[in-house]
Amino acid sequence: MIRRSSCDVLVLGGGPAGLSAALAAARAGAEVALVEREDCLGGILKQCVHDGFGLLRFGEGLAGPEYARRFIDEALASGRIRVHLEAFVHAARRVEVGEGAGGFFVLECLSQTEGVFELEAPALILATGCRERTDRQVWIHGDRPAGVMTAGLAQQLVNIQGLLPGRRAVILGSGDIGLIMARRLLLEGMEVEGVYEVRPEPSGLNRNIQQCLVDFGIGLHLSTTVTEVHGARRVEAVTVAEVDSRGQARQGTERLVPCDTLILSVGLIPENEVAASIGLGLDPATKGPRVDQGGASEIPGVYVCGNALHVNDLVDYVSESGELAGKGAAAFALALAQGRPPPGRSLIPLKAGPGFLYALPQVLDLAAPGPALLWFRSNSTLKDGATVRLRAGEAILLERRYSALRPPEMERLELDLQAVPPGTASLVLEFERREAGHG
Ligand SMILES: Cc1cc2nc3c(=O)[nH]c(=O)nc-3n(C[C@H](O)[C@H](O)[C@H](O)COP(=O)(O)OP(=O)(O)OC[C@H]3O[C@@H](n4cnc5c(N)ncnc54)[C@H](O)[C@@H]3O)c2cc1C
């Protein structure tokens, strides 16, 4: 017989999203169980020792562990959050109690300290973060010797385990983690030969290009990629080549770059295996489940937040999305516990017009209280800016002028739901460009 305990709200993931969600649910009066596979809370922030976290929320540039600590201390002191560490959730399932009587969610957990156990609750929050793309997801010929690793693994080796991954690194991809690791490896004594980016523009934030590469004299090679890895047991060199507008290597531009480490910073993907196990479909644009502005998914009682929803650029936004999911999940669970129906919803789709990478949330609940936060990313760089409009048919509900838009930067809008005309069937986000950049 598998041991099972129950609570009001289950939170899967102990990163900044899960911590904020658990705290918000506990503050609303829910009994919470939080499950985390690692041996301490904080998620990926534990290995982010550089500063710059919490500028929006706290007005301070904290290091990742400092930012996480503020939430961990409060969570542990709340008395309403039971934390299960070193507990891996391999699946979730929904159990129906009987026709019309609702049901609950069960998390199936495997733990070194607690063995196999299950947790059940009427509401479930998925805060599983994201994972890094690997060399299998980018097209590189050649050998697979030791010394090829993702930027996140290099970050873990250096910042948590105190190990240098090699002596001379090439970095493929200009995502933020790669940029931050370029600087970190240099400061720790490695030579960083350069950062190679297949696209014609960097994929990381401008502030990281300046602070991590320019300030340290590390070269950024745009429209250039690694085409081959050389080495038997250990990386000995890589071939780099310029690419054309279709991403194909230009013949004659190949160059051999001696190095013993190839760091991949080629993108993050929301982690949603547990979401899939309960049948949540994913939005192909965000790679996360479809939700409303409170993080409520298509399955009543399941909420999603943080990087599991879409890859966020700032941790402050991750915490904000956790809070919304935590409040919503607590309201759902406590209503059921008190024999009331969960808060009713009145959903309309939010569509992104041409030129957007995506808009979030995918649906808006017009019955929810308060203003709704909307997010979007443009699918190309608009150096000369654009005007973004939110339309309900002919009515313009929001209009904002941006001096520039770049895909790595998330943009945030606040919509007063009272402004949505009665009978509106859908909202559309669209923009007028002055001049299009490359896509
Ligand atoms: C390698 C890496 C480095 C990053 N560096 C930066 C940076 O320098 N600056 C920055 O602003 N952002 C960085 N980010 C982005 C960062 O992920 C977000 O800012 C923020 O930490 C996301 O919070 P989260 O809670 O959604 O996810 P996470 O912090 O990733 O937390 C998710 C948690 O869920 C747990 N989990 C997942 N699945 C399971 C399961 N099945 N069972 C049990 N537990 C599970 C994980 O162990 C993890 O602790 C980085 C991301 C990665 C992947």
Image: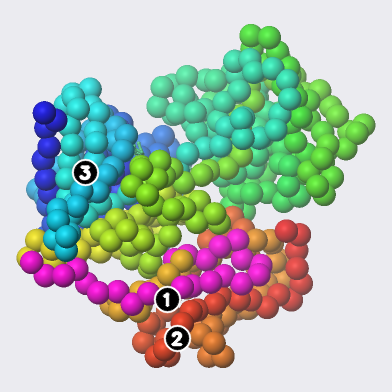
Q: Is residue 155 visible?
A: yes
**Color encoding of the figure:** rainbow
Residue at far left of view: 338
The amino acid at mark 2 is: Thr
**Residue, far top:** 233
Label 2, label 3: how many angstroms apart (C-alpha)?
A: 37 Å
Task: Tell me the amino acid under the disc marked 1.
Answer: Ile
Give whichever of 186, 406 is nearer the camera: 406
Instruction: Tell which circle, 2 or 3, labels the residue nearer the N-terminal end.
Output: 3
Q: Residue at x 22, y 22 (%)?
A: 112
Which quarter shows the N terminus?
Answer: top left
**Secondary element at tag 3:** strand
**249 drawn magenta:** no
Q: Position of residue 426 (x, y in %)?
A: 48, 79
Q: Which mark is residue 106?
A: 3
**Quarter of the view holding residue 416:** bottom left
Q: Is residue 117 left or right of residue 261?
A: left
Residue that numbered label 2 is attached to: 424
Start and end of the magenta stretch?
339-361
**Residue 122 location, quadrant:** bottom left
Three-letter code, disc 3 = Val
Residue 128 seen in the figure: no
The residue where tag 1 is placed is 348
Label 3 CB-ligand 1 distance < 8 A: no
Give the Cα distance between marks 1 and 3: 30 Å
**Are the two marked residues, 2 and 1, in contact with CB atoms closer than 8 angstroms?**
yes
Q: Please indicate whether residue 299 sits to the left or right of residue 267 in the image.
A: left
